[in-house]
Amino acid sequence: MLRKRIAQILAAPQVGEELQIAGWIRTRRDASGFSFLEVNDGSCLANLQVIANQGLGNYGEEIKKLSAGCSVIISGSLQESPAKGQAVELLATGVQVLGWADPESYPLQKKNHSFEFLRTISQLRPRTNALGAVARVRSRLSYGVHTFFQERGFVQVHTPIITTSDCEGAGEMFQVVTPSASAGEAGGEFFGRPAGLTVSGQLQAEVYAQALGNVYTFGPTFRAENSNTSRHLAEFWMVEPEMAFCDLEGNKQVAEEMLKYLLRLVLAECREDLALFDRFIARGLLARLQQVVDQDFAHITYSEAIEQLLQAQQSFTYPVQWGVDLQSEHERYLTETIYQRPLIVTDYPAAIKPFYMRVNDDGQTVAAMDILVPGIGEIIGGSQREERYDLLLARMQAAGIETDGYQWYLDLRRYGTVPHAGFGLGFERLVQFVTGMANIREVIPFPRTPGFAPC
RNA sequence: UCCUCGGUAGCUCAGCUGGUAGAGCAGGUGACUGUUAAUCACCCUGUCGGCGGUUCGAAUCCGUCCCGAGGAGCCA
């Protein structure tokens, strides 16, 4: 008998078809002479309703004892459902129980659980509607990132996870040490110098961009910051394209195009899951996403942003002044109150941005861009890179960076240097934006935050 | 890391100004039923986050630590 996934069955139901499904019981309801089983196999949000008649051999012994979480393989024929709520249902000819889930101890109930509670059972939370939907949307977005870049001729580069270069300004690095090093013995420096987990693949991506043209990295990134917010993780995934022969303008275009491409993709292909978020997590989500796809992003410079903030009617906790970095409240005001759509802010003061960003002709600002999004804040940060050797060196020295360890990076400016640009997209922030999930810990399968890494 | 709020049954919470604990849901049993967060009846459930202090007496007041949420900083 043909094993089918529920998504497949519901996409094109063939009444009368004999088939088999495999999944987990969500709930059982007994009627006279038979039971309703709701089975979910993870292929989609919807369950398949199964009719299990008392005539089945194991009805009294097993089927009547099924409860949430039990795993089953069910054979039967697809029937039109006489009742409301579902178009089709499976009339079972055989119900095989693979694994029981003691209802006394199984933590998932047939009700809404708080996300905080679900986080304490990360081994079971993907079995819930919302977290399962997040996982499917996340997967689709991930695949979409690859297709977007691959369709445009970008080459994926696997930049190192362990690195000896700190992408200055990107946050604290986790140190990588061997046991002997932690014991204070000599020889513990496995690489002969201090090493850490990457905080960004950008510097290494630049190497490949200046050989292959357009490249991107998409991998895990680590920050040892003691950040306790709904927008930060110690381990997260970042998408970082890097483009040779590209300036800030080109960088902005790719970023906007990419975000719209990804939103269009999930709006078309994850409709059922997004509808769940729209209904229970963030009302109006679908309309908001569609709006982002349809509208052009707003473009302003940092200096224009400062002017607008100075003219703002409302008062801010942090004073606004040219030269200071934009605070969350400022970013919020700009993207949520003034523009009410994604906003690209460019040309920040050089003093508040990292050494690798290209200095503009005014000598005061750099060709940086941040993309701010309502509800999340910064989702993308990028820049045109400084391709002029002397200027780069001067900025590194001004920043107090040991240039010895960065000679390889400087070399790119010595041999056939080209203008180039790139950006970093926080993948979890994208998933947050798309799903409307309030906390970033719910959009990654196993969140790592200060004091929390249970498995 | 800072500010604010919170931690009471498996889950979500109530418990006012101190007198040693309750509801809904879940779970169990039974009834009923083409049900769909099913319905009805009955039953079970607690180191009141940890430690220390004040008090005749602390879930309640004080101190401290741990954990969570919201906001901030850092950023993606």
Image: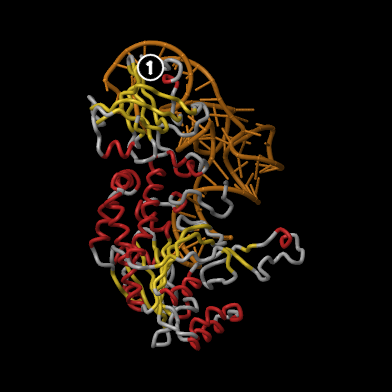
Q: Is residue A320 visible?
A: no
* Residue at screen point 47% across, 76% down: A353
Q: Is residue A388 above or below residue A133?
A: below
Residue ranking furthest to the front: A1
Q: Nearer the viewer, residue A198 or A317?
A: A198
Q: Is residue A363 left or right of residue A122?
A: left
In the current view of this chain or complex, which residue is farthest to the right? Answer: A185
From the viewer's side, name the closer residue of A5 and A396.
A5
The vertical placement of A384 against A41, above or below, is below
* Place of residue A275 in the rendered image (x, y in percent of width and height, measured from the top left): 29, 45
Which residue position is annotated with label 1?
A56
Residue type at numbered disc 1? Leu
For the point 37% across and 45% down, the residue is A133
Secondary structure under the numbered disc 1 in the rendered image: loop
Query: In this figure, which colouring scheme has been used for the structure?
Result: secondary structure
Residue B48 in the image, given as x and y percentages of width and height = 58, 36
> Would you say residue A372 is visible in this rendering?
yes
Q: How many marks?
A: 1
Residue closest to the eye, B17 or A131: A131
Q: Residue shown at 48%/39% (left/top)?
A: A124
State which chain disc 1 sits on.
A
In the depicted structure, whether residue A154 falls above or below residue B56 = below
In the drawing, does residue A271 fall left or right of residue B45?
left
Corner quadrant of residue A14: top left
Near mark 1 (Cα within 10 A), the count class, few <14, some 14-19 or many ≥20, is some
Look at the image and tell me in which quarter the N terminus of chain A lies: top left
Residue A175 image position (x, y, % from top left):
63, 63
Where is residue A412? Give x, y as percent.
49, 81
Q: Residue at x 53, y 67 (%)?
A: A171
| A5 and A365: which is toward the camera | A5
